[in-house]
Image (cartoon, rainbow, N blue to C red):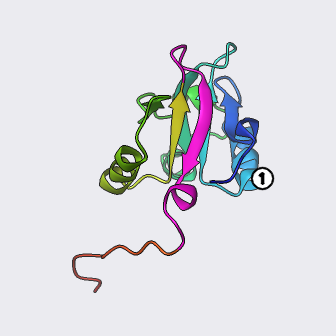
Amino acid sequence: MKNIDINDYLIGINDNLRHAMKSLDESNRKILFVIDENKKLLGTLTDGDIRRWIIKGKTLDDPVEKVCNKKPIIFIDDYSLEDIKVTMLENRIQAIPIVNLDNKIIKILFWDDVFDSDYNFEIKGDLD
């Protein structure tokens, strides 16, 4: 797995959505992790969250706090890679933060780091 700079994926709870969009674009990922002033994880924010906000006619000047998912899927530092894989597949998520007992992010596991590039999975259902 690659080492990443966690700070590239963090955004403050009071930052506005315009800033979040810029951060998402710069990170080349589709997710940010929302933190408070003590760097504790409060939620996640995806490009889809922002897109749905815009569709509702809301403003990009609103704080991230109004839009973020306040119940993100997390794992504590004592995790199993198999559990991470199952959770990512079952919930169709691209990233999982690993937090310590203070709820501070210590690691972020992204799909492409968890699953080798050789990993194949079956798509079920009609594609029509």
Answer whether residue 77 is visible to the viewer in this image. yes
Point out the image quarter for the N terminus: bottom right
Q: Is residue 118 above or below residue 16?
A: below
Q: Residues within 10 Å of mark 1 (few under 14, many from 20)?
A: few
At x 33% / y 51%, what residue is drawn? Answer: 86
Q: Is residue 101 magenta?
A: yes
Q: Is residue 34 above or below residue 50?
A: above
Amino acid carrying mark 1 in the image: Glu
Spot occupied by residue 39 in the image (x, y as percentages of width and height): 66, 19
Say left or right for 51 vs 27.
left
Answer whether residue 67 is visible to the viewer in this image. no
Q: Is residue 93 above or below residue 64?
A: below
Instruction: Give the image quarter of residue 6.
Output: top right
Q: Secondary structure at mark 1?
A: helix
> Residue farthest to the left?
125
Instruction: Give the image quarter of residue 23.
Output: top right
Point out the image quarter for the C terminus: bottom left
User: Closer to the camera, 33 or 6?
Assistant: 6
Q: Is residue 40 magenta?
A: no
Q: Which residues are magenta?
A: 100-117
Report the residue marked by disc 1: 26
Instruction: Give the image quarter of residue 11.
Output: top right
Q: Is residue 59 above or below residue 93?
A: above
Spot occupied by residue 82 in the image (x, y as percentages of width and height): 37, 49
At x 29% / y 83%, what residue is drawn? Answer: 127
> Residue farthest to the bottom?
128
Tally the marks. Answer: 1
Spot occupied by residue 40 in the image (x, y as percentages of width and height): 60, 19
At x 62% / y 41%, what residue is drawn? Answer: 32
At x 68% / y 34%, what residue is drawn? Answer: 10
Say left or right for 22 vs 105.
right
